[in-house]
Image: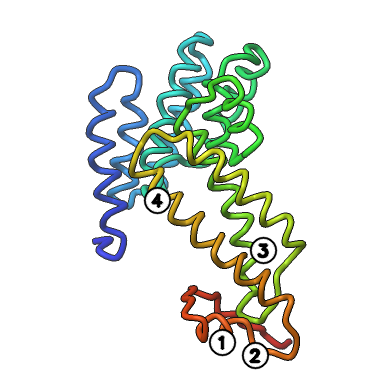
Amino acid sequence: MNYWNSDNFEGLKAIGAQYLARKGYELFGEYCLQKEQGLKKQAIATVNKFVSHCKTLPLAEQRHIAEELSSLGFWHRETHQLLAYPLIVLLKGVLTQWTLDEPNNPIPHKWLGFIGEDIASYERALTLEPADEICLTQVALSHLNSVDFQTHHLSESVLLGDISLAKDSLASAQALIVRLQTHESKSRLQNRHDYYQSMINCWEEYSTLFGVEPFPDWCAAKGEQFDFWSIVYYQR
């Protein structure tokens, strides 16, 4: 069963077993196991029961749960059914209020960045805790993703937006990457940065020329290899 999505369900099973044995998280563990078994209605009922239970807890316990499950969700992002929508709403509410109550505490800002998919929250956390590896990585990724968006039509010899925006994004990403201490993350992001930097450098040179072949062909002739997007247009 679920062979097409086996990694996800195996992840839910392991996490469910772990949290079923943890005091205060039994319902969450039960939800994970029910979800892993394909018991959708029961799983939703259980997670709603867990959310209702959390709302009755003292504020400190709610914040502890929000930090715990946000961290769990971040480090198990491949387990995409781990945090159900009602739980995300709860966590976002707790974290948002926490940031208002303790604006200089980086913890709720960081996890609100993840749960709320909000780069501004990551950036706020980073100003409070400049060495936080998660925030450094996520903000650097946001800058690189911006360049990725600008360049995704280069297969048609079109750069979206001004090249200065791409250069600024790359410079911002580089400034964050050099601050990373984790070698694997630093190397991965540096390689991605260098890839886009090379692409932008080529585009800058190409854009000064006239009457030349399409940008991908021009790059290939120079020995530059990029993975250009395939653009498909649909007619109505």
Q: Residue at x 67, y 85 (%)?
A: 234
Classed neighbour count for the residue bearing mark 2: other residues with Cα under 10 Å, few (<14), some (14–19), many (≥20)? few
Answer left or right for 103 relative to 138. right
Toward which corner of the image does residue 68 lie, by quadrant? top left
Label whose residue precedes the other's in the sequence (2 or 4): 4
Q: Quadrant of the N terminus?
A: bottom left
Q: Look at label 4 and name its amino acid.
A: Arg
Q: Residue 195: horizontal and vertical position, in percent?
A: 49, 62
For label 4, the SS is helix
Disc 4 to disc 3, C-alpha distance: 20 Å
Q: Which mark is residue 150?
A: 3
Q: Could one spot residue 42 in this view of the protein?
A: no
Q: Look at label 3 and name its amino acid.
A: Gln
Q: Look at label 1 and name its amino acid.
A: Asp
For label 2, the SS is loop
Q: Which residue is mark 4?
A: 188
Q: Which residue is mark 1?
A: 217
Question: Which mark's residue is nearer the viewer, 3 or 2?
Answer: 2
Q: Residue at x 52, y 33 (%)?
A: 135
For label 3, the SS is helix
For label 1, the SS is helix
Disc 2 to disc 1, C-alpha distance: 6 Å
Q: Residue at x 63, y 62 (%)?
A: 149
